[in-house]
Amino acid sequence: MEPRNLCPSTTATVFACHAIANAFSENIYELAHLRKDWNVGYAENLKKEALEIYDHLAASDNFKTRLEKLKIWRELMISSLTAIGIVRASMKNDYREDKTFQKEIYQKLGYNDYFSDAKNGDHYTVFLFVKVFAENLTPELRQKIEAFGLDPHIIDRIVYNSKQLETFQECFEMMNNKYVLQDEDLARIEKLYRVIRDISRVATAYFYFEPIKRESFNFFKVLRNLKL
């Protein structure tokens, strides 16, 4: 098992939470009325907490190693989520007259169970989603998915990524299992992530018609835009 402190999902969580905490602080005057505990003091404390965790991570001896692994992990996650989204949109278009097949494919390939949390930035859910998609993709299902002209390379990308992400499986499971988060820093990161995730869900809904602001609360779009 790879050392926990090198886990790319840990690094990604810290990076994204730091950026989203800053966005929350910048927009607190507009968002404050949405929740009774959202105010300037709350936003500033959250921003401070995220910065302290970020600085602690950046000061570690293996920070460069973290960044290199994060680049690989980030590309796998983002390309997987993008491809999965394209397949979903294509199925809505191509089988608009066949709702039964739409329901079947969304159920078998994991959309019903994982899509909502995955697009909202849950790393472990993306990992499970890609894994289930690849495992349940039969030749018959693939043929129907591609029947109307969808680029086969999109499906190939999901299958390929599922194999590459297996190298991070223990890392994902570690971040999802509260009983192995014995390290104080990791527990602190997990607590911050839960708070930021909940904020992001509300903020993205509020900024639905303001795409620039909305993207600043989307975990994967934040990660995509980070300069590593």
Image (cartoon, rainbow, N blue to C red):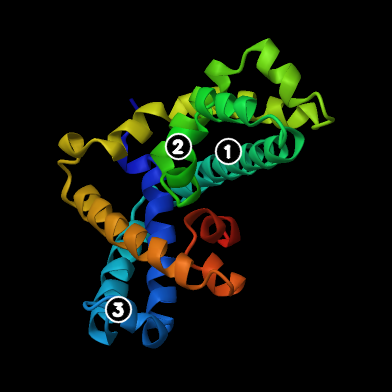
x, y percent for residue 105: 59, 26
- Label 1: how many Cα within 10 Å (few below 14, some 14–19, many 20+): many
Residue at image position (51%, 34%) is: 111
Residue 122 to residue 52: above or below: above
Residue at image position (19%, 39%) is: 178
- Which label was assigned to residue 114? 2
- Label 2: how many Cα within 10 Å (few below 14, some 14–19, many 20+): many
- Which label was assigned to residue 76? 1
x, y percent for residue 56: 30, 61
x, y percent for residue 109: 54, 26
Q: Is residue 59 visible?
A: no
Q: Earlier in the sequence, mark 3 or mark 1?
A: 3
Q: Earlier in the sequence, mark 2 or mark 3?
A: 3
Image position of 159 (left or right of 115): right
- Residue beneath disc 3: 43
In depth, the one of 8 and 136 nearer the eye is 136
Q: Which secondary structure, mark 3?
A: helix
- Mark 3: amino acid: Ala
